[in-house]
Image: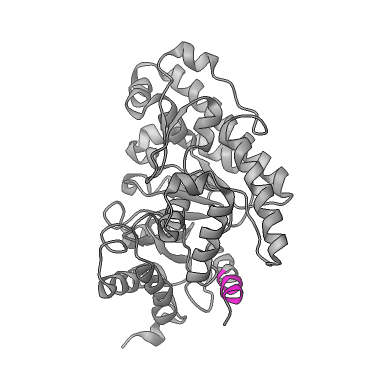
Amino acid sequence: MVEEDISKINAERILVTASLEEPDQVPVSLLVVGDWCAWSYGVNERQAYFCPDTLLDAMLTARRKFHGLVSIKPDFSVVIEPSALGSKIRWPEDTTPWAIPFIETAEDVDRLEVPDPYRDGLMAASLEVYRYMKRRIQEMGLKINVEMPYGLRGPFTLGGMLAGLERLIQWLYRRPETAHLLLRKCTETVVTWGRTQREASGSSFPVFLADDYSGFLSPKLFKEFSLLYIQDVFKPFNHPLNTYHNDAQTSQLLQLLPETGMKIFHMGSPRTVSLRTAKKEIGDRVCLMGNVDPLKTLTFGTPEEVERQCREAIEEGAPSGGFILAPGGVVGRGMPAENVKILIEAAEKHGKYPLSALRT
């Protein structure tokens, strides 16, 4: 079977699974990021991020390795929104970039302006790279869809990147009005960026909302300072595959997460949340995606350990449908391709429905 056929069939399985039904087989999702593509391709990350041809070649190589399950898209890691809002970016040659917090006072929050995606920071660069990649794919004669980044920061996470997580959490208690103003501006920024991506691509798309910082919140604080803003992000982008990603500690938030408006919950490793518990508590309300440990198992584990954890995840999450096998995080720098391939193969080996047919 050619890679495009595998990709298409897997996408069809994900659509069925996201509706909480059983496909013929448990689908797989791989969040293969630019730093893995660059590392695997043998170039440093900064070189790949700022040379569209290099990044495109690296992504196409990764796509061939993983049966077409790698998206082709601009990738500026997690710093697109912060850069457009005015944050300076720390960008080492051989690792992922990070935004340097610059919001220190209430006056800084007052001065913060929602960016123009066609002009400001890496938003504008992403749009340019998107157009370039589409043109190059057409010139190559490849029938591959080029995607916009589609990954949006959760408003609380974006606020923490701009102000520093410690300062933002202090404001939740001492200056809640300042925290809410910052979060409203972050929400407007994220929604504006999502709408611009939709305009550039000319089509509806699933939102992938990355919101790890909310894992530091109690249920009470999550309801007041995160939940409503997440809802405001998802509302304009109604799509059956809208995904909420949080690979931090989310055990305390499980009952609240379906209220975000997501369809799929991309959870972290078993060290941050129990898949068995999540299946029991919210598995009838949202599709679960995960949660093979990306570090301990997929990066440093043996092939036998990878297959064992994949099978355990399928046994815990797949009964009655509504489960996508995936790393509990990204496919990032240093993760052996062989272990990722074992995850893909495990879905076929252990995840065919009815699951009882495979049990002895």
Quarter placement of the C terminus: bottom left
Q: Quadrant of residue 136?
A: bottom right
Give the residue drawn at x 48%, y 14%.
Answer: 108
Give the residue drawn at x 55%, y 69%.
Answer: 68
Report the front residue among 320 and 59.
Answer: 59
Instruction: Locate residue 100, reporting x and y percent.
Output: 40, 28
Instruction: Locate residue 271, reporting x and y percent.
Output: 26, 54
Q: Is residue 62 visible?
A: yes
Instruction: Locate residue 57, reporting x and y percent.
Output: 55, 59
Left or right of 188? Residue 254 is left
Quarter placement of the N terminus: bottom right
Q: Is residue 259 visible?
A: no
Find the magenta span and give its range: 3-10
Left or right of 54? Residue 344 is left
Residue 50, above or below 71 = above
Looking at this view, name the residue that lies furthest to the top: 107
Figure disc tally: 0
- On whether residue 4 falls in the magenta region, the answer is yes
Q: Quadrant of residue 317?
A: bottom left
Looking at this view, name the residue that lies furthest to the right: 202
Residue 198, above or below 89 = below
Instruction: Locate residue 183, reporting x and y percent.
Output: 49, 27
Left or right of 297? Residue 62 is right
Report the front residue among 169 and 120.
Answer: 120
**Model colouring:** one colour
Report the front residue among 100 and 269.
Answer: 100
| Main SS class of the magenta portion in the image | helix
- On whether residue 92 falls in the magenta region, the answer is no
